[in-house]
Image (tube, rainbow, N blue to C red):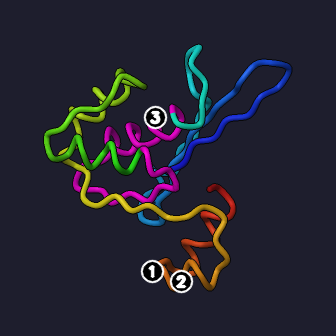
Amino acid sequence: IDGSACSAGGTKFAGWGMWSADSAAFCVSSPLVGKRQSSDRAEVRALVAAAESAEGVVDVFTDNMYVKDTAELIKVGGKAGEAHKDLWARFAGRSHVLGRIRWIKAHLEEKEAIERGFTSEGWCVWQQYG
């Protein structure tokens, strides 16, 4: 999963996406809807999409530690803070489908990604979409 935001002329625009080598249904991206536009919100929205799209257990990779830590907290019965509460509530309703969530440093070189347990194919996709 991934999210991103940029500013143009004083306005922020954000978008999110998710990708899976195993399922074309998990290859989705979209602009972030609503007035609140930030990379963190886009990252949370991507996690929500993955959880809501999963028919079974899904493992997730993210480069956002806030998303990883909050998802793990919710999964063990904790609560998210006030930021993005609407999206975290949606995730909480589907958190049982989250198997493992792993943080990966963004912008890794291929060798470093492979040393961290990624495949060469996974690294190529992360470079293109992450």
SS assignment at label 3:
helix
Q: Looking at the image, which residue sits at the far left? A: 77
Expressed as whole percent of the image width and height from the top left, the position of residue 37 reads: 61, 24
Classify mark 1: helix, strand or loop: loop
2 or 3: tag closer to the N-terminus? 3
Mark 3: give few (<14), some (14-19) or many (20+) Cα within 10 Å: many
- The residue identified by callout 1 is 117
The 10 Å Cα crowd at callout 2, few under 14, some 14 to 19, many 20 or more, is some
Q: Is residue 61 magenta?
A: yes
Q: Amino acid at mark 1?
A: Gly
Marks 1 and 3, how far apart in space? 25 Å
- Residue identified by numbered label 2: 114
* Amino acid type of the residue tagged 3 in the rendering: Arg
Provide the residue span drawn in magenta.
41-66
Question: What residue do we see at 38% from left, 57% from top?
Answer: 60
Give the residue type at disc 2. Ile
Mark 3 — residue?
Answer: 45
Q: Residue at x 57, y 76 (%)?
A: 121
**Residue 56 x, y percent position in the rendering:** 22, 53
